[in-house]
Image (cartoon, rainbow, N blue to C red):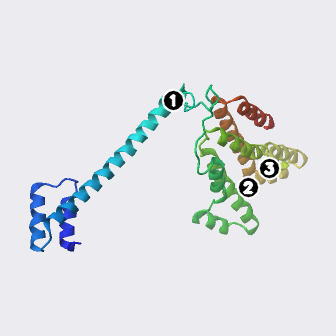
Amino acid sequence: MFSKELEALINASLEDGVLEEYEKAAIVKRAKSEGVDITELEIYINSILQKRKRDHDLAEDAKQEKIDQRKREAFGRVCPNCGRQVPPMTLKCECGYEFTQQRTISSIQLLSEKLSNITLTKAEENEIEEAASTDQIAKRETFIVNKKIDIISIFPVPNTKEDIIEFLSLAIAGANKKLGFMDIKTNCYKAVAIAGIIIPVVGWLIGAVFLMTKSFAEEKLKKAWREKFEQVLLKGRSLRGDAEFTQQLDYYESLLEE
């Protein structure tokens, strides 16, 4: 509608959302030199100022809503069914209303994606390539398992009833995973001790070399799943859930093997 030069002058003058008198005078002077209708110019400038004010008000409202939300989470919520004030971690109000959270993706989905999208660094790939051909597969699996352990260990504990139950159902499988005899460290030490008794010196040397090359990654992964299972179970116990939720927690706890 206006020249690029006039548009640039208008935008620069309205940068801070306020039109000073000297800025207005400069715009009007430029507009007159270009033969622009001053009334149209004022309407255009006012529309820009009003739009910026609306955008500013919306941003302030959104900011205030976040502050109010944090306050509600800190001091509890109000049941929309009966109006009773309930603690922040309460899953079900005394009147029977159940609090739910809208989720676009569950904790299980997030964790599964992280575990399935593990990649090795260039340095790790080089180390695998430099290893003996017979050790490359084992070394790669060790790297991947160690990364899985890190992901599981630092993954945040879910805080909703649905996520907790889903997480327990996944974690119990990893915590109860059956390992081979030689995947367990104590069994390997016992085997090396027996070999050392049967074949003195040689048995000890072979056993020592074996233990040095054995990572026991699968046993560590099982331990990581167990620790995460116990963390999530403890979180579930801390929530004020209904009888059904408590029964589900009891059920998964009973599945955990010693």
Between 175 and 143, the one nearer to me in the picture = 175
Q: In which quarter of the image is the C terminus?
A: top right
Give above or below for 95 relative to 198.
above
At 74% from the left edge and 64% from the top edge, which residue is drawn?
137
Measuring from the top left, give residue 39's x and y in whole percent: 15, 64
Whichever of callouts 2 and 3 sits on the residue coming sooner in the sequence is: 3
Under mark 2, the amino acid is Thr
Mark 1 lies on residue: 76
Under mark 1, the amino acid is Gly
**Mark 1: few, some, or many residues within 10 Å (few <14, many ≥20)?**
some
At 52% from the left edge and 30% from the top edge, which residue is drawn?
78
Return the mark for residue 213.
2
Q: Do the residues labelled 1 and 2 touch (CB within 8 Å)?
A: no
> What is the distance, in whole Å, between disc 2 and disc 3 at their CAs?
12 Å
Mark 3 lies on residue: 183
| Nearest to viewer (mark 2 / mark 3) | 3
Q: Quadrant of residue 222?
A: top right
> What is the distance, in whole Å, between disc 1 and disc 2 at their CAs?
54 Å
Under mark 3, the amino acid is Asp
Measuring from the top left, give residue 10's x and y in whole percent: 19, 64
* Residue 78 visible from this viewpoint: yes
Give above or below for 90 relative to 208.
above
At 24% from the left edge and 72% from the top edge, which residue is drawn?
1
